[in-house]
Image (spheres, rainbow, N blue to C red):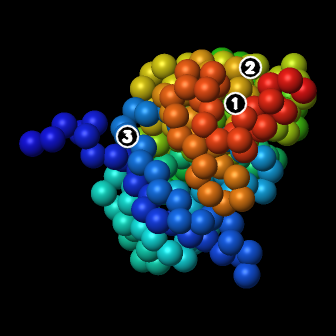
């Protein structure tokens, strides 16, 4: 019997995605093991966000297969529900409900989707607010928080659904520079707890620190896949070299 680590928790096989005639993903194959931390980078328009949005079916792929924790993604409602229960997602924009307090934003999912009792959901929410280091903000509304605090609330909200996999789509790109680190610190702590993570980000210091695997994409193709050591010191493709030169020296 193979151990759980042997079978990838996310498997993409020959995945292609079109927007009209534009091909956003070209025959992409990628395996992510349980507990693995994958950082996806590349120039804008390279397909990074599309890749991550296909994993939880915010976008539908046209060709190939995506299997998440044994569930094949297709049009069935049951596969979608199974995926959404397993996969949490954090976006560039925080997507918090402005008319709800921080605590209410966090308890909405567990109460509605998991039929959790409100008292239990409150306890769960507070434990995750502690984890992202802002328990004192529980009764505030999103507009009363900084961007960095709002993004940490968004991470805590995803964690309240107790996902097995977390996807991050450029979670710091809408933040002011001084707020980026507070969000990356929370993500680093999450990575060290063994959470399976796929992150699209330009934060190369973070990538170096937490990634097990670096993925470089360009023009919808997965161009390079390597450990951080190899990726940063000896990238194979010219495209990857040029990208790293730009991003590390700007």
Callout 1 crowding tier (Cα within 10 Å): few <14, some 14–19, many ≥20? many
Ranked by sequence position, the earlier of labels 3 and 1 is: 3
Q: Which residue is mark 1?
A: 152
Seen from the viewer's position, the closer of residues 1 and 123 is 1
Identify the mark at residue 196; answer none if there is no mark.
Answer: none
Label disc, if present, on residue 33 of the rendered structure: 3
Image x and y of residue 241, in percent: 72, 35
Query: Which x, y percent locates residue 4?
Result: 24, 39
Q: Are marks 2 and 1 in contact (CB under 8 Å)?
A: yes
Nearer to us in this view, 130 or 200: 200
Asked if residue 170 lies left or right of residue 157, the reply is right
- For residue 182, the mark is 2
Which sits in the foreground, 192 or 127? 192
Chain-order first, disc 2 or disc 1: 1
Residue at 38% in and 60% down: 67
Name the element at disc 1.
Answer: helix
Asked whether the viewer can see residue 169, the reply is: yes
Q: Residue at x 34, y 46 (%)?
A: 8
Q: Is residue 181 left or right of residue 25?
A: right
Where is residue 242 shown, x and y percent of the image?
A: 78, 37
- C-alpha span from label 2 to label 1: 8 Å
The image position of residue 145, as x and y in percent, is 84, 30
Q: Are marks 3 and 2 in contact (CB under 8 Å)?
A: no
Q: Earlier in the sequence, mark 3 or mark 2?
A: 3
Q: Where's the C terminus, which quadrant?
A: top right
**Residue at 39% over, 70% down:** 78
In the image, residue 98 above or below residue 171? below
> Gap in Å between the C-alphas at discs 3 and 1?
25 Å
Tag 2 secondary structure: helix
Q: Residues within 10 Å of mark 2 (few under 14, many from 20)?
A: some
**Disc 3, SS:** loop
Q: Is residue 11 above or below residue 123?
A: below
């Amino acid at each position: 019997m193979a151990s759980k680590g042997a079978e990838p928790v996310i498997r993409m096989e020959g995945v292609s995605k079109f927007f009209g005639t534009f091909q956003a993903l070209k025959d992409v194959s990628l395996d992510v093991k349980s507990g693995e931390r994958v950082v996806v980078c590349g120039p804008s328009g390279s397909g990074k966000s599309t890749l991550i949005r296909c994993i939880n079916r915010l976008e539908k792929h046209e060709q190939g297969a995506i299997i998440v924790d044994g569930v094949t993604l297709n049009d069935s409602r049951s596969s979608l529900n199974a995926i959404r229960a397993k996969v949490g997602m954090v976006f560039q924009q925080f997507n918090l409900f402005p008319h709800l307090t921080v605590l209410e934003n966090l308890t909405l999912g567990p109460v509605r989707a998991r039929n959790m009792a409100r008292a239990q959901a409150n306890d769960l929410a507070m434990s995750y607010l502690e984890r992202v280091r802002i328990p004192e903000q529980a009764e505030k509304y999103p507009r009363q928080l900084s961007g960095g605090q709002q993004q940490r609330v968004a991470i805590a909200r995803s964690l309240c659904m107790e996902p097995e996999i977390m996807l991050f789509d450029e979670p710091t790109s809408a933040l002011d520079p001084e707020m980026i680190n507070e969000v990356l610190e929370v993500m680093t702590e999450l990575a060290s707890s063994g959470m399976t993570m796929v992150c699209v980000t330009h934060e190369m210091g973070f990538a170096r620190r937490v990634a097990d695997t670096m993925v470089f994409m360009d023009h919808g193709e997965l161009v390079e896949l390597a450990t951080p050591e190899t990726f940063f010191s000896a990238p194979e493709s010219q495209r990857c070299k040029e990208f790293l030169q730009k991003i590390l020296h700007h």
